């Protein structure tokens, strides 16, 4: 669990992993409307999807730009995921935690376990699909990847699922409202005032 450093508010990093299509982005989007919650905008070399905004969903970089950031030590972790590079930027994470905010990091399993091995403080949450059949349905239904990519992501999902035991918490995303409420509670995010 997160410890408070001297002079710090109750800021914390909350890492959210799980197989592609399990609902990580959907859950995170719902939590972002609460005050004091910030999303970690990762850098990536993958192509922008329709509807995505540079600097909001990701910082979209060329491979060269990404490598420069690696050399500068700008990432707390980075990894190759499905053939593209992704990295979590250090500076916004430190600023958010120092400001007492909850910093939500969407990260693949290898990245999260890298941070765990480094002893990085945070709440590690694994989002699991209710079943692999349902995961396939969601991935296909999202319609952002072709059949080959979906197939590759489903194969990887089985390996990722085995790693769930290394997380602090596993949340099954069957009923979305319930899953959001569970993650909210684990992350220590206050209920939204209506
Ligand atoms: P991820 O970010 O983990 O890859 P997404 O958040 O993009 O996954 O969700 C994949 C698809 O599943 C989306 O179309 C989303 O609307 C849908 N989805 C997410 N959570 C649920 C849920 N609890 N029940 C049904 N569909 C869901
Ligand atoms: P997508 O391209 O579908 O947005 O994300 C693909 C995968 O990359 C997801 O598993 C997501 O969690 C992971 N990912 C996104 N940002 C980062 C990051 O900064 N670091 C790591 N290691 N993985 C990330």
Image: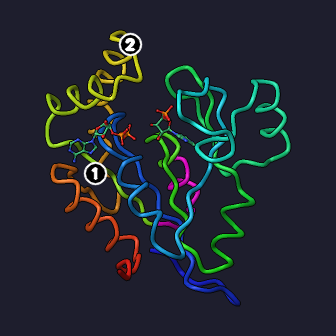
Residue drawn 80% across the image and 47% down it: 73
Q: Nearer the viewer, residue 143 or 109?
A: 143
User: In the rendered image of this protein, does residue 166 appear above or below residue 48?
Assistant: below
- Judged left or right of residue 20, residue 60 is right
Q: In what quadrant of the picture does the C terminus appear?
A: bottom left
> Which mark, by number, is residue 98?
none
Which x, y percent locates residue 158?
26, 30
**In this picture, which residue range is highlighted in magenta?**
114-122
User: In the rendered image of this protein, does residue 117 appear above or below residue 131?
Assistant: below
Give the quarter of the image for residue 58. Answer: top right
Q: Which residue is mark 1?
A: 165
Q: Earlier in the sequence, mark 1 or mark 2?
A: 2
Circle 1 packing at 10 Å, graded few (<14), some (14-19), many (20+), is few
Residue drawn 70% across the image and 61% down it: 92
Instruction: Choose mark 1 or mark 2, whichever is in front.
Output: 2
Q: Nearer the viewer, residue 60 or 64?
A: 60
Which x, y percent locates residue 176?
22, 54
Circle 2 packing at 10 Å, graded few (<14), some (14-19), many (20+), is few
SS under mark 2: loop
Q: Which residue is mark 2?
A: 146
Q: Nearer the viewer, residue 144 or 81?
A: 144
- Judged left or right of residue 41, residue 178 is left
Q: Residue furthest front?
A: 194
């Amino acid at each position: 669990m997160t410890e408070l450093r001297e002079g710090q508010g109750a800021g914390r990093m909350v890492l959210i992993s799980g197989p592609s299509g399990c609902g990580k982005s959907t859950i995170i989007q719902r939590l972002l409307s609460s005050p004091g919650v910030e999303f970690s905008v990762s850098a990536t070399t993958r192509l922008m999807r329709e509807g995505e905004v540079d600097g909001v969903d990701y910082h979209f970089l060329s491979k060269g730009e990404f490598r420069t950031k690696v050399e500068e030590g700008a990432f707390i972790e980075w990894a190759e995921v499905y053939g593209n590079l992704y990295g979590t930027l250090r500076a916004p994470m430190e600023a958010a935690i120092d400001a007492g905010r909850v910093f939500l990091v969407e990260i693949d399993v290898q990245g999260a376990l890298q941070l765990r091995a480094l002893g990085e403080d945070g709440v590690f949450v694994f989002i699991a699909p209710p079943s692999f059949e349902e995961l396939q349905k969601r991935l296909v239904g999202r319609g952002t990847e072709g059949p080959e990519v979906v197939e590759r992501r489903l194969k990887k999902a089985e390996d990722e699922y085995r790693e769930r035991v290394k997380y602090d918490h596993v949340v099954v995303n069957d009923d979305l409202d319930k899953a959001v409420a569970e993650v909210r509670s684990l992350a220590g995010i206050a209920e939204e005032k209506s």
